[in-house]
Structure formats: structure tokens, C-alpha cells
Image (cartoon, rainbow, N blue to C red):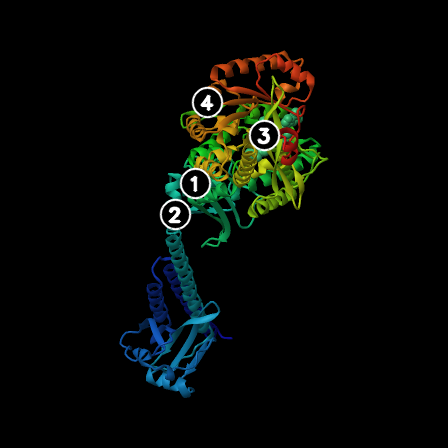
Amino acid sequence: MNRNLESKIYETDFYRMEEDMKKQLKKNRVITEILQKLEEDVNFEDAVESILKIVGEYLELSGIVVSKMISEEPGFSVIRRWEADGQGGDIDNISKLSSADLPPVAEAVTVMRAEDASGKQKIFMDKCNVKSMMAVPIMLNNAPAMFAIFIEKEKEREWDKETYDFVLDVCKMIQSILYKRVSKNSLVSSYNALKEILSNIGSAVFVIDKYSKDILFANEIALRMSGKNLLEKKCYDFFHNGYNEFRCKSCNPHRTGEYFEEVYNEGRHQWQEIKFTDISWVDGREVSLCVVTDVTEKKKYQQRIEFQANNDFLTGLYNRMRCEEDLEICIRKSVETKKQGLLLFIDLDDFKNINDGLGHQYGDMLLRMISMKLQEISEIEKRCYRVGGDEFIVIIEPEIRDKASDILKRIKDMFASPWYLNGTEYYCTMSMGIVEFLGDSQDVNDLIKKADIAMYDAKRGGKNQCVYYNRGEDITIEENLNLEKNMRYAVSIGCNEFEIYIQPIVNMKTEKCIGGEALVRWNSGKLGFMSPGQFIPMAENLGLITPIGEYVLKQACMVNKKWSDMGHDMRLNVNLSIIQLLRPDVVDTISEIMEKTGVKRSNMVLEVTESLAINDMGRMKEIIKDIKKLGVRIALDDFGTGYSSLNYIKKMDMDIIKVDRTFIKDIVDDDYAQAFIKLITELSAVLNAEVCVEGVETIEQLQTLKSTNVSMIQGFYFGRPMPVSEFEEKFVGL
Ligand code: C2E
Ligand code: MG
Ligand code: MG
């Protein structure tokens, strides 16, 4: 090769190299410029506009259009365009095209020349006066979101490999700006929307980064609740004030997924529901969304409902339902520990009298007073229940079984002292049935039933006592129900299943019969023969004692009238229940019966009991006075039992005092009993009352009494209660 040629080649090569380098440098400069635009925090459209200008000038194109496909006409919406100087005009036609004229959307790059074009592409190129073009889709989420169309108008253009690659690179950059903008926008807009929503939900809301425990977001209420700026604080900064031991979910690795807890915040005096949910935060981080809602009102309502369900409205004690639940637990404990527990079933004696006599508000007051007193016994404070009108249950748990006798004593003492109602003292006794759980039963209902049976035994035994359940003789609830049903029936058909027996009463000095006491018997067609102890308590509870008592009085009056008609004026005592006595029409009823039967009133003695003492003395005094005005005598029955009050005899103006038979039982050797009888006779003499002694069974008892001023004797020694005809035969002489 000659040197010239050589140098020529060399020159040419050098020149080309130089050209290439220049080109490369220019390209690098362009790319740097574009990258700078990418870094600038301008909006997408402005960034695109700058890039188009740089690229267009560099490639010496006629124009570039970035447009997106839209659903409405014209189908193309130009986002930004660039044109070389003096070459514009036709590009604008793009936006005038109708969608029908648009070439089909291609996901691939399309390079086209006017001479090769056909169909829609040709129309498009003609209308825009384009000789050559390259259309590149800009993809977002795997679909073309826009097109960048690089246009040449003047001359045919070679879209060489280099240009082609460059154009694709540029489009990738535009794509990356677009992606950034879209994701940033959605981030901002979703954050704003979330903020808006979370600020308006009425609960405190904050978001905790699960790993760093940073609070990333907190709404207004959360800020107010914690009283400080929570951002840049940790989750436990929120849960420090008044939350005691509460540990939030993020701090407790055992809590996963959704979790909620109701917590009492002492600082705010508030019940709060704290709920955690795992979510992805707007920036993709894993967070716990914590929602704290004030549920105090709901909680209060719940507690009220619970209280109403568990407690007795009147006394505030737990009710029967709660009793059964607690008993179940206590029985289980008892079985586990093999220790006995006790169930006490308490029924107030003659509570009806307080209600009828003083009115319900005083009855209610008494129930409340009793309930309060029961709860004062600390061992059973939470184990007292009101299970019925005047029925209470007390559970003595196995662990305090050794204190049972002390507790029992304290309950008994409660009823031994008077209650103050309406400014006056009232006595109210109770009958108690006691069962052992474990020993007597391990079933809730069965235990209550057995305690109830024992309580009825206590009533039958004369009330005011505690009776242990006796496994031998079961009078079941069913039997009681049966008794009630039959008694109601017997009354409904006119009481003629009831019959009076008469027990003689004799003059102590002469030992001659001066009369007798009418004592009722029930010859039930279904249940057989029954003595008063078996049915009077229930008759009183059911109020059936009124018709039965009236029937007895009528029978007694008729019998006495018959005797006096035949010339035998004898006394006849009739028992009057307190229930009858408290009826407002009691005087009229007695008067009417006496009127109708025509009995000689001076022959009749009405026996009332000392349980009167629990009632309003003033009112009783009036009633007794009114009854006495009818011309009958009044006897105070069973004196010495219950709450004997000498003051009472004085105030009540009694004609006869009947000393209870418990005093006579041991009178022969009991100095106290003798002294008591002596005292009563002396007092009665002052009050102008006669004394009758009940329960004389032996000649020794009679002889001991002979040394006293007792005027009348009643007892098996002279005769048991007997049918009227027998009495008439033996003592009236008919
Ligand atoms: P009460 O009025 O004190 O009647 C006396 C009771 O003592 C009678 O029992 C009688 O049988 C019993 N008794 C009499 N003498 C002796 C004796 O020497 N030894 C023993 N161990 N007992 C003796 P009864 O008939 O079972 O009556 C029991 C109670 O039932 C009566 O006690 C009375 O409170 C009540 N009761 C009876 N009849 C009526 C009635 O018609 N109306 C009302 N409201 N109560 C009645
Ligand atoms: Mg009597
Ligand atoms: Mg008596």
C-alpha cells in the first residue's frame, strides 16, 4: 500500500473515529441530560416535554408526539409533543383523527414508511403528512399506557440499529418516569384517603411498624387520647398511661393475626376495646393497625344487663339463677376437695303479715334490711341469694365449713332482735332448712329441693327454727304441690272435708270440764286424715286459712249454740290465725257468723297467738278491742314461746292467757318453770285475766300446778282432742 493511500485511509479512519467519538459524546451528553431531567422533581408532562426536545433535536426529527389512547373520541389524547422549527402544523392533525382512522394498537414497536403503508396506517400517515415514523408503546402494568411516535416528514429516514436502540432507551426512561409518578400518586392518594377515613372513624387509630415498633401514623383521637405527638414514638408510649399490665400485640409475640381485648383504662376511667389487625401499609411495610374504641357505655349497659340477670332488683342480692350457677361451682369444688359445703334455705315466718298489715313498702323495706344484714356476715357476703318472695339461700362453701356453726348462729341472732319499721319494733322470725352438698346430694336442683323440704319441716315443727334435711323422711316438693292442690280443692267444695275435734278444758280446782278448744282436722278424700301441724302452715301461706278458719268458727258456733239451746252453757275456744286477724273485714266476718248461728257470744273464746307481736301493736290493740266489743273473750295462745312480752299482755287487754305446754313438760322438777307460772298468774290477777295451762299429761304435773293460781287446765290427762259427738257424750252429757 502506498503511503498516500495509506495516509488517506488513515485520515479517513481517523476522521470516522473522530466522528464516532463525537457522536458518542453527543449521545452521552443527551443521555446525561435526559437522566438529569429524570432526577428533577418536575411533573411527568414537563419532564416528557424536556426529554422530547432533547431527543428530537439530537435525532433531527420533524416531531415527536406522546399520546395516550382514550375511550372517547378522537381516541388519541396528546400529552406532550415537540416539533422541529417551522415543521409543525400537520402533527396537530393527530388530535383531529377519529378513532376509526387510527391504526390498530400494537404492543410491539412499529416502524413504518409512507410508501409501504396501507389501510388505516396509510390514512394516518397521509393526514399527518408523515413520510416515516416509529411508534413505541410505553408500557405500564404489562399494557401499553401511551405511545411515543417519532415522526419524519421531509425525507425518508433510515431507522438504523443505533437510532432504534436509542429510541427504545428513551422510551424506557419515559416509562420509568411514568411508573414513578403513578406509584407515587397512588401512594399519596391512598395515604390521603386512608388518613381521611381513619380520622373520621370515632376511635383512636394508629399504625405500628411490626418490627421497629415505631408509630407510623396516628389519627386525631389517638393524639388526643395520649396527649402527645405519637409520631416517632413507639407503640408502648401509647400504652403507658393507665393501662396497667397491658401489652400491645406488637410487644407480645404470642399474639398473631387479628386480636382484640377489652381493657379498663384507670387513668381515663374508661373501658376500651383494643383491636389489632395485621395489614400492609401504603408503602408495603408490614404493620399492625391498632384501633382503640371507648366502649364504656356498652360495658355499662352489659353490666346492667348482667346485674339484672344475676341480681334481685329489690334487695340487690344475687337471684336464683346466679345461685344455681354458683352452687354448681361450689359443688364441683366440694367434690374436688372432698369437703362438705352447706346450703341454707331460709323462709321468713309470717312475712305475709307484715305485707298485709303494714303495706308492701314496709314488706320491701324489711326484705332489704334482712338482705343487708345477711351480707354483713363477711364469710357469706357474696353467697346470699334471694330466691323467692321471702325466701333466701345462703351457701356456706367447703373451705369455710368449719365456720358454719358460727355463721348459723349469726343468722339466727339476726332474727332474734327486732327490726325497726315505721318507727316501731317488729319481730320477724325465719324457718331454715339445711342440706349438705356431697352428703345429701351433688345436684343443684336436688339440693335446693331438699333444703326446701327441710325448711318445710322447720315450719311444721312450729317455725322459728333450723332443721337439717332428714334423708329418711322425704316430703317431696311434689307432695307439697299435691297438698296444695288438694287443699285448694277441699276449700273450693265448701270446706266440709274439714272437721272440728274438741279437747276438754277443766277448772283446776273442781277438775270439772268447763268447755273445750275446737281443733281442726282435715279428712282429705285423697290424702287421708291430717292434723293441723300438717297443713295449717301451708294454709296460712296460701291464704286458705281464712275460709278454713271461718268454716271452723261457724261449726264451733253451731255446736255451742246447740249445747246452750239444750241448757248447757259451756265455753268453746276457737283458734284465729293472724292471717285472719289482719283482714280488714275480720270483725264483720266474726260478727256475721255469730249473728247467723245465733251463738251466745259470752260462750265463745277466740285464741290469738303471740306472733301478733311482730305486728303493729297499736293496730292490733284496736282490732282486739273491736272483737271484744262483739261480746266474745280473747285468749292469748301459746304464751311463753316466741317473743313473750309481758308488756304485750298488759296492752292487749287479754281475758285468758294460755301458757304453752313446753312449760308444763318438766314442771315437776323445773323451778324456773314453776316460778314462771307463778309470775304469770300473779300478773294476770292484776290484769284481771285468767290463766289456762296447756299440755298437762300426768297427775304429777296436775298436782304441781295445784299449788298455783292457775284457773284452767287443758291436756291429755283430761282428754285428747276428740270428735264432737264423743266430746258431747263425755263432757256435755248429751
Ligand atoms: P293450740 O291452739 O295450742 O292447740 C293445742 C294443741 O296442743 C293441740 O294440737 C292439742 O292436741 C295439743 N295438746 C293438747 N294437750 C296436749 C298434751 O297434754 N300433750 C301434748 N303433747 N299435746 C297436747 P293440735 O290439735 O295438733 O293443734 C296444733 C295447733 O294447730 C294448735 O295449737 C293451733 O295453733 C293450730 N290449730 C288447730 N286448729 C286450728 C284452727 O281451727 N285454726 C287455726 N288457725 N289454727 C288451728
Ligand atoms: Mg289454740
Ligand atoms: Mg296453744
Name the residue tied to disc 1.
233
Viewer-nearest of discs 3 and 4 = 3
Name the residue tied to disc 3.
517
The mark total stands at 4
Q: Residues within 10 Å of mark 3 (few under 14, many from 20)?
A: many
Q: Ligand 2: does it lie within 8 Å of the C-beta at label 3?
A: yes
Numbered tag placed on residue 653 in the rendering: 4
Name the residue tied to disc 2.
219
Viewer-nearest of discs 4 and 2 = 4
Q: Ligand 1: does it lie within 8 Å of the C-beta at label 2?
A: no
**How far apart in space, not on screen, are marks 3 and 2 (Cα)?**
88 Å
Numbered tag placed on residue 205 in the rendering: none
Quarter of the image where the C terminus is located: top right
The foreground one among 248 and 1 is 248
Residue at x 66% of width, y 27% of height: 719
Label 4 is placed on what type of residue? Asp
Whether tag 3 and tag 2 are in contact, CB under 8 A, the answer is no
Disc on the earlier residue, 4 or 2: 2
- Horizontal side, residue 9 vs residue 669: left or right: left
Disc on the earlier residue, 3 or 4: 3
Can you give x and y, in whole percent of width and height, for residue 338 in the image? 71, 32
Disc on the earlier residue, 4 or 1: 1
- Determine whether the residue tagged by mark 2 lies in a helix, strand or loop: loop
Can you give x and y, in whole percent of width and height, for residue 305 in the image? 48, 44
Can you give x and y, in whole percent of width and height, for residue 181 in the image? 39, 61
Label 2 is placed on what type of residue? Asn
Answer with the quadrant where ligand 1 appears in the image: top right
Viewer-nearest of discs 1 and 3 = 3
Residue at x 50% of width, y 30% of height: 370
- Residue 11 appearing in the image: no
